Image (cartoon, rainbow, N blue to C red):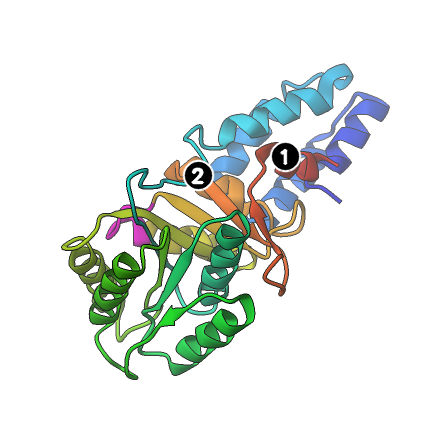
Amino acid sequence: MGLFSKFIAKIKGTNSFSPADWQELEQELLASDLGPTLTRTLIEQAKKVKSEDAESALSQILTEQLSSRSRDSLVNPNGLTVVMVVGVNGTGKTTSVAKLASTIKSAGSTVLIAAGDTFRAAAVDQLQTWGDRIGIPVVCGKANSDPASVAFDATQEAKRLGVDYLLIDTAGRLHNKNDLMAELEKVKRVVEKTSPVNEVLLVIDATTGQNGLSQATLFTESVTVTGIIVTKLDGSAKGGVALAIEKELDIPIKWVGTGESHTDFARFEPASYIAGLLS
């Protein structure tokens, strides 16, 4: 059931909402990870909605909270497109790299993956397994080797092979957040000695709620995030974090991961998402 379905049903049926009803709606929105600021904004605007146009009015209100920036992929029209994928471990970052690579390949482009999360052997193994499964080569380094070195070597290899895309998985955890952010900045700086980084995608797990918003804020302070991949997103339950992130940071969600298969990956569709919140 969508976040606003109960509200729509009630306002259509009785044309009256008691203070207790508004309080209940506010609690539901907060529980859905919209955050207090956005929740207050939505409640204030929802109070102005009339029963005869409740659904269309709410749809417009919610849509206005989303980023108006383009959700198109940022590509290099004249050669190699480099995409860095960042995020904390456990969000589905490495799996999202593989899914994005598979999606790009299915669209007819050639791809190379750099296993840059060298501090986590499982991530490198995971990408190699994915690469074998989806038929995409993976550039790896030694365990605990310099991630920037792996990214640099992969960039050189991508240029040598003449592939269309290089996707770089990055470290998701180091000793502290300052080390992690410095490492990401270094990877980007080293890669750009050879080829510009066209896109930086941040992976957020929708079920982490407001913590996901905190992660997004942290990463955007260190690298220029151009888009977001949200994993485990649905239109109800914890789906409100998508609205919160876009409203707070004005960074467009570009992709959503919806399952375990490499095909469970799709473009974020704002209209479908909003419809899910309402239905």
Determine whether label 1 and label 2 are within 8 Å by CB.
Answer: no
- Which residue is rendered at x = 46% and y = 36% of the image? 71
Q: Nearer the viewer, residue 7 or 77?
A: 77
Is residue 222 in the magenta section?
yes
Q: CA distance from mark 1 to mark 2?
A: 15 Å
Q: Position of residue 145 (x, y in %)?
A: 23, 79
Q: Amino acid at mark 1?
A: Ile
- Magenta: main secondary structure equals loop
Left-right relation of 43 to 118: right
Alpha-carbon neighbours of circle 1 within 10 Å: few (<14), some, or many (≥20)? many
Q: Where in the figure is residue 102, as x and y percent of width and height?
A: 52, 58
Q: Which mark is residue 77?
A: none
Q: Is residue 131 above or below residue 219?
A: below
- Where is the N terminus found, in terms of image quarters? top right
**Residue at 28% in and 83% down:** 142
Q: Residues within 10 Å of mark 2 (few under 14, many from 20)?
A: many
Q: Which residues are magenta?
A: 219-225
- Seen from the viewer's position, the closer of residues 38 and 113 is 113
Disc 1 vs disc 2: which is toward the camera?
Answer: 2
Position of residue 120 relative to residue 55, above or below, is below
Quarter of the image holding residue 59? top right
In the rendering, at what x and y percent does residue 68 appear?
Answer: 44, 28
Q: Is residue 181 shown in magenta?
A: no
* Left or right relative to 111: residue 258: right
In the rendered image, the residue lying farthest to the front is: 161
Q: Is residue 110 left or right of residue 116?
A: right
**Among the 4 quarters of the image, the one containing residue 245:** top left
**What's the residue at 26%, 75% (across, down)?**
175
- Helix, strand or loop at mark 1: helix
Q: Which residue is mark 1?
A: 274
> Which residue has dot 2 on it?
252
